[in-house]
Image (cartoon, rainbow, N blue to C red):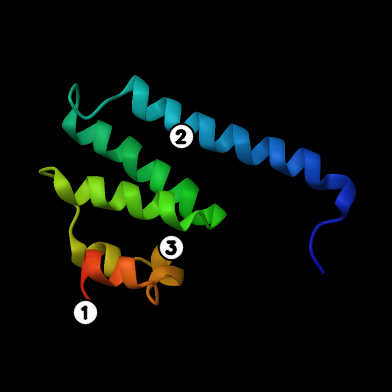
């Protein structure tokens, strides 16, 4: 059924605000300044992208999280329910392994 067309502009605005806020958080708290909270900000950006179904953006951020020293692991990403929709994606499988 979906959302009524009359709500689309409002929904688009909310989506843009959510992405902008999550991106801004990564700018305000960069990993270089605070490795723990900065990585949390990146993970929150991943979550926003994942909830919106932005696969490429999710994968770019996951690649970043795995490229730096952090507490994030391929196993965590492979088993995270929020990322379950990516499990069939070849790029995701290469990134986190097939499990």
The residue depicted at 26 percent of the width and 32 percent of the height is 38
Q: Relative to 97, is 44 on the left or the right?
A: right
Mark positioned earlier in the residue sequence (1 or 2): 2
The residue depicted at 33 percent of the width and 49 percent of the height is 60
Q: Relative to 98, is 21 on the left or the right?
A: right
Q: Mark 3: which secondary structure?
A: helix
Q: How many marks?
A: 3
Q: Nearer the viewer, residue 42 or 58?
A: 58
The CA distance from mark 3 to mark 2 is 17 Å
Q: Is residue 71 visible?
A: no
Q: Nearer the viewer, residue 44 or 15?
A: 15
**Location of residue 91 in the rendering, given as x and y in whole percent from the top left corner:** 32, 66
On residue 22, the disc is 2
Quarter of the image with the N terminus is bottom right
Q: Are marks 1 and 3 in contact (CB under 8 Å)?
A: no
Mark positioned earlier in the residue sequence (1 or 3): 3
The residue depicted at 35 percent of the width and 55 percent of the height is 59
Around disc 2, counting alpha carbons within 10 Å, would you say few (fewer than 14), some (14 to 19), or many (20 or more)? some
Q: Relative to 18, is 74 on the left or the right?
A: left
The residue depicted at 20 percent of the width and 63 percent of the height is 74
In the picture of the structure, the residue carrying the numbered disc 1 is: 99
Q: Mark 1: which secondary structure?
A: loop
Q: Is residue 89 visible?
A: yes
Q: Mark 2: which secondary structure?
A: helix
In the picture of the structure, the residue carrying the numbered disc 3 is: 82
């Amino acid at each position: 059924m979906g959302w009524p067309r009359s709500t689309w502009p409002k929904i688009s605005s909310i989506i843009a605000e959510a992405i902008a806020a999550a991106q801004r958080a990564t700018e305000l708290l960069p990993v270089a300044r605070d490795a723990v909270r900065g990585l949390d900000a990146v993970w929150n950006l991943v979550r926003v992208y994942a909830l919106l179904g932005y696969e490429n953006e999710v994968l770019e951020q996951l690649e970043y999280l795995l490229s730096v020293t952090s507490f994030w692991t391929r196993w965590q990403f492979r088993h995270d329910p929020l990322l379950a929709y990516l499990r069939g994606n070849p790029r995701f499988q290469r990134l986190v392994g097939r499990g």
